[in-house]
């Protein structure tokens, strides 16, 4: 509907033929200054900075450059000493002593691969035996909280209201709380 008007307006704007009559004061879409810029504004434009008093979030760069160089910000340092590079001897020692990651374990042939990648035929007796030995070696990771004998919450029973709670709710011995109804 308004496409033609917009295209005509943009053509006038780009070619520099736009006048004050072309702009409705009702629609604050674009600010065009037909007056000559002041000396201060001219200096700012020469430096590549558009005066941005109204909108401090953005800056219009009037002097673009073809530089690929980006200015990387520098930050303050917390520590003055830097870690020294490791010598070659230390690197060799680290490779020998470091853990290369989780060791794969085939329960069938005890090789360094997964059970599903084992080239040998499956021996279910050996798999079960090796799996039990592996779990016995690794031990229990953590104790489940509901198996722990000296629990902090033994005095609480689900669905049972204690005498203190009945008193706090203002209930008689034969009354049920309102949330049950």
Image (cartoon, rainbow, N blue to C red):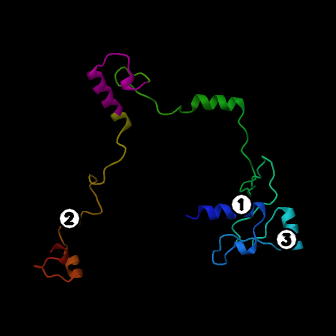
Residue beneath disc 2: 158
Residue beneath disc 3: 41
Say what secondary structure mark 3 lies in. helix
In this view, 165 is above or below 93: below
Distance from the alpha carbon under mark 1 to that under mark 3: 26 Å
For the residue pair 168 and 154, the one nearer the viewer reads as 168
In this view, 164 is above or below 46: below
Residue at 78% from the left image edge and 70% from the top image edge: 51
Q: Where does residue 54 sit, x and y in percent of width and height?
A: 71, 74
- The mark nearer the N terminus, 1 or 3, is 1
Say what secondary structure mark 1 lies in. helix
Q: Where does residue 136 sit, x and y in percent of width and height?
A: 33, 34
Residue beneath disc 1: 11
Give the number of marks. Answer: 3
Q: Where does residue 66 sit, x and y in percent of width and height?
A: 80, 48
Quarter of the view holding residue 119: top left
């Amino acid at each position: 509907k308004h496409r033609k008007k917009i295209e005509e307006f943009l053509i006038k704007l780009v070619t520099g033929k736009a006048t004050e009559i072309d702009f409705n004061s009702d629609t604050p879409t674009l600010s065009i200054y037909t007056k000559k810029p002041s000396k201060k504004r001219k200096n700012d434009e020469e430096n590549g900075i558009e005066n941005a008093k109204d909108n401090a979030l953005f800056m219009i760069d009037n002097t673009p450059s073809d530089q690929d160089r980006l200015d990387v910000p520098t930050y303050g340092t917390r520590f003055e000493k830097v870690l020294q590079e490791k010598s070659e001897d230390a690197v060799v020692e680290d490779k020998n002593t470091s853990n290369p990651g989780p060791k794969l374990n085939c329960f069938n042939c005890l090789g360094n691969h997964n059970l599903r990648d084992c080239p040998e035929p499956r021996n279910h007796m050996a798999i079960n035996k090796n799996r039990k030995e592996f779990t016995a070696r690794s031990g229990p990771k953590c104790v489940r909280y509901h198996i722990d004998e000296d629990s902090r919450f033994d005095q609480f029973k689900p669905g049972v209201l204690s005498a203190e709670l009945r008193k706090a709710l203002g209930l008689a011995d034969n009354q049920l709380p309102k949330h049950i109804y």
